[in-house]
Image: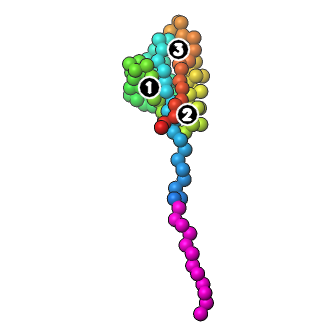
């Protein structure tokens, strides 16, 4: 009779850890029109006009709005794209792009 022992490895969670999530926050100002905001959101985020309009209204009413929640790298890219979008040609005193920040989701 042989003395064979069988051991089983403990079961571990094999699901990959999810990356932390970050929100891209668009901040209100008085130097950009609704058309600018809507166009920017459609171009940079691929939003349909209705969703872009809803975000533009929220930014105007609340002073800020979450545009997207994603990974850190993607959030940084979208924030940088907002900052690089350029000024609103319909507003003479407009000096540049809108402000955006990223915030971690807790």
Q: Nearer the viewer, mark 3 or mark 1?
A: 1
User: How far is the residue under mark 1 from the one under mark 2?
Assistant: 14 Å
**Magenta segment boundaries in residue numbering:** 1-12
Total of numbered circles in the picture?
3
Q: Secondary structure at mark 1?
A: strand
Query: Mark 1: few, some, or many residues within 10 Å (few <14, many ≥20)?
Result: many
99 relative to 19, above or below? above
Query: Mark 2: few, some, or many residues within 10 Å (few <14, many ≥20)?
Result: many
105 relative to 95, above or below? below
Q: Secondary structure at mark 2?
A: helix
Q: Quadrant of residue 94?
A: top right
User: Magenta stretch: dominant SS?
Assistant: loop
Locate residue 52, reporting x and y percent. Answer: 43, 26
Locate residue 55, reporting x and y percent. Answer: 42, 25
Q: Nearer the viewer, mark 3 or mark 2?
A: 2
- Which residue is denoted by mark 3 in the rendering? 88
Q: Quadrant of residue 72?
A: top right
Q: Is residue 100 left or right of residue 54?
A: right
Locate residue 10, reporting x and y percent. Answer: 54, 67
Residue at 59% across, 32% down = 77
Q: Secondary structure at mark 3?
A: loop
Q: Earlier in the sequence, mark 3 or mark 1?
A: 1
- Which residue is denoted by mark 1 in the rendering? 65
Residue at 44% across, 25% down = 65
Query: Mark 3: few, some, or many residues within 10 Å (few <14, many ≥20)?
Result: some
Locate residue 25, reporting x and y percent. Answer: 49, 27
**Observer-nearest residue: 9 or 50?**
9
User: Is residue 9 part of the magenta span, yes or no?
Assistant: yes
Residue at 50% across, 11% down = 31
């Amino acid at each position: 009779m042989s003395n064979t022992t069988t051991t089983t490895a403990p079961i571990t969670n094999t699901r990959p850890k999810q990356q932390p999530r970050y929100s891209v926050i668009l901040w209100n100002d008085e130097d950009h029109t609704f058309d600018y905001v809507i166009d920017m959101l459609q171009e940079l985020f691929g939003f349909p006009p209705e969703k872009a309009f809803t975000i533009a209204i929220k930014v105007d009413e609340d002073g800020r709005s979450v545009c997207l929640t994603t990974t850190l790298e993607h959030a940084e890219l979208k924030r940088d794209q907002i900052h690089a979008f350029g000024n609103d040609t319909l507003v003479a005193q407009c000096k540049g792009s809108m402000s955006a920040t990223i915030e971690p989701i807790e």
